[in-house]
Amino acid sequence: MKKDKQGCDLQSCMLCNLCIPAWKPAIAAHRQNFTIKKGQLLFSEGDPVNGIYFVNTGKVKVHKHWGEGKELIVRFAREGDIVGHRGVGSEMVYPVSATALETVNVCFIDLAFFQATLKVNHDFLQALMMFYASELQESEKNMRNLVHMPVKGRIAHALLSLMKKFGANEEGYINMTLSRQDLASYTGTTYETAFRIMSDLIQDNIIAISGKSIAVKDPARLALVEKEAG
């Protein structure tokens, strides 16, 4: 993790957008900007919480240990998103890890200043509460899917969710690179099962793959796969 001398523009992230104008000089004084290379950790599961990260550029996977030598990807974060907030609570340790999927620039706010910010900036506090609620709902839905939905439906749901979050280009390719192993970890299955189901979806002309890029060629049919599995 490399510290950047040049910080963010104080306008892009949720904190800067929603804080009161008089608070921005305090943010400028307390923030720290870092560049994280692809594959590097922002923080690890079990580490003491020392602050919150706001993603300025790039994409991050948030993941945790799941059984013997397995990994479960909890969510993906993009520019404008927050990571590290799951550790703020009674135990004050990160319950998940965060790894850069590409070169990532983040703005780090230490815990004491983050807590002070919550007391002063009510619009930011309200937005953060809504973010927590939305993330909790999505987490509960994903856990329900892990228990009740067949793998094919989970993969269909994951691809549609990623397309909604990251968008797609004119050819339908989702604006992120995703390995089959990461897709398997995101849907709670094995690499072999994910590979087989992806091959079926390619054969049915529902998706296409080029390297680590995935295109949803027929969103309606993919949504039908999800619905039938649910």
Image (spheres, helix red, strand yellow):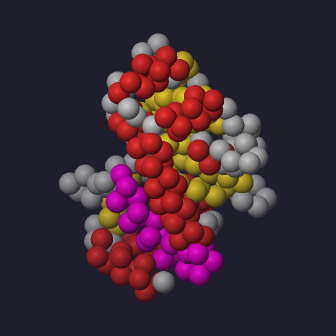
User: Is 33 rendered above or below residue 131?
Assistant: above
User: Is 195 rendered above or below residue 120?
Assistant: below
| Residue 34 drawn at (x, y percent) | 52, 24
Between 52 and 42, the residue placed more toward the observer is 52
Between 59 and 169, the residue placed more toward the observer is 59
Between 140 and 207, the residue placed more toward the observer is 140
Please report the residue visible at 49 percent of the width from the left and 34 percent of the height from the top: 120
Question: Farthest bottom residue?
Answer: 228
156 magenta-colored: yes
User: Is 196 rendered above or below residue 215?
Assistant: below
Observer able to see residue 6: yes
| Residue 114 drawn at (x, y percent) | 56, 33
| Residue 159 drawn at (x, y percent) | 41, 64
Please report the residue visible at 36 percent of the width from the left and 81 percent of the height from the top: 224
* Figure quadrant of the N terminus: top right
Image side of residue 4 versus residue 16, left or right: right
182 magenta-colored: no
Main SS, magenta residues: helix
Observer able to see residue 45: no
| Residue 138 drawn at (x, y percent) | 50, 64
> Bounds of the magenta span?
144-166
Please report the residue visible at 65 percent of the width from the left and 37 percent of the height from the top: 43
